[in-house]
Amino acid sequence: MSKAVRKPNPEEQAVLESLQVRIAEPHELKRCHQLLDEHHYLGSPKPVGERLYYVVTDAQGQWRAVLIFAAAAKHLRARDQWIGWTDAQREKRLALVVNNIRFLLVPEQTFPNLGTKSLRLALARLSSDWQTKYGHPVLVVETFVDPARFRGTVYKAANWILAGTSRGYRRVSKGYANARSPKMVFLKALHRDARSLLSRAVMDPPYQTGGTKIMLRAASMYSLPDFFAAIPDPRRTHGRRHRLATILALAAGAHLAGMRGYRGMSDWAKSLGQRARARFGCRIENGHRVVPSEGIIRDVLIRIDPVELDKALNRWNDVYGKEDKSLAIDGKTMCNAIDDEGHQTHVMSVIGHDTKTCYTQKKWATCE
């Protein structure tokens, strides 16, 4: 026979209904660490970067639980497979995932459902609190559970997903230490579309984090088509649905906005409103401005003359680069880099005027 599950008694139920969660005050952090050192098998953590400490209290202000959320693991196969993002996407968007690095129910005060209720209350406010303190929300929370000690009952009861197991490595000051016992990896989405948001080519503005902020005036951005107008069109005369200058301007604009790959450029172009599309010179069909597809952008970029592109980018830089005191686009041809169709490979770079820092580069070739 299975073991009967004890339910909270009336007094415990009253405590559950009175629970409140709040961010720990600075002077309370010492007590948080003391409790963890005394009662948590991992002891108190030393998180760096973004983190939040929560305290769960009852109606009398008595501490019932302590939870700490901090930066997510940099590499975690089970999580990354569950989300479905690329390495480049993970690098840019990892801040939208946080790790529940500690969860302690204060000893001698526990009873059924206390852990689940405490966790639920913390997660209900986690994203908004993170937005307030760090300027961006949270989409997914992860945590590790040692199967040699626990079964993850609290997380399972709170509808977290068991995504798999870790490989058992742990971070040290220089790289990773030898593998120990693997941990169960639990994940919780705080947004119903969290996985699709994290894996899409272009993130919505509320979720854009990290990266260099590229500040360009509208005039400089939307003048790009004019500087590409004189470049010879390598496409056949028949079937030229979109102007070459428009395609190249959209590609350059998307690159400046941080997009990577043909799909990212295409998605960025699709995200533009009608006014922005008009400034880029997009064609009108059925009363609406339309943008070139991913295939058209790719076809143009692998066939365009890199020398002519470089000249056009340099002209744009001479006029607008120094005025904006920000970044310039530069194109260079790669020696001895010719694809199967005889097209040369070239690199588009974004360079800072003052520091001469190369913020990003893109190699145009027949394959991504």
Image (tube, rainbow, N blue to C red):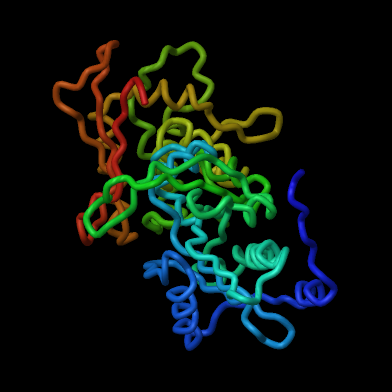
Residue that sits furthest to the left in the current view: 335
Q: Residue at x 61, y 45 (%)?
A: 161
Position above or below: 224 against 50? above
Image quarter (top left, top right, bottom left or bottom right) of the N terminus: top right
Residue at image x 68%, y 50%?
A: 159
Residue 335 at x, y percent in the picture = 14, 26
Q: Is residue 50 above or below residue 260?
A: below
- Of residue 359 and residue 198, the one placed in the foreground of this image is 198
Residue 235 occupies quadrant: top left
Residue 341 x, y percent position in the rendering: 29, 11
Q: Which quadrant: the C terminus?
A: top left
Asked whether 9 or 201 is in front, the reply is 9
Q: Is residue 284 above or below residue 355?
A: above
Left-right relation of 67 to 59: left
Q: Residue at horizontal 31%, vertical 24%? A: 365
Name the spot of residue 255 as percent of width and height, x first. Answer: 39, 42
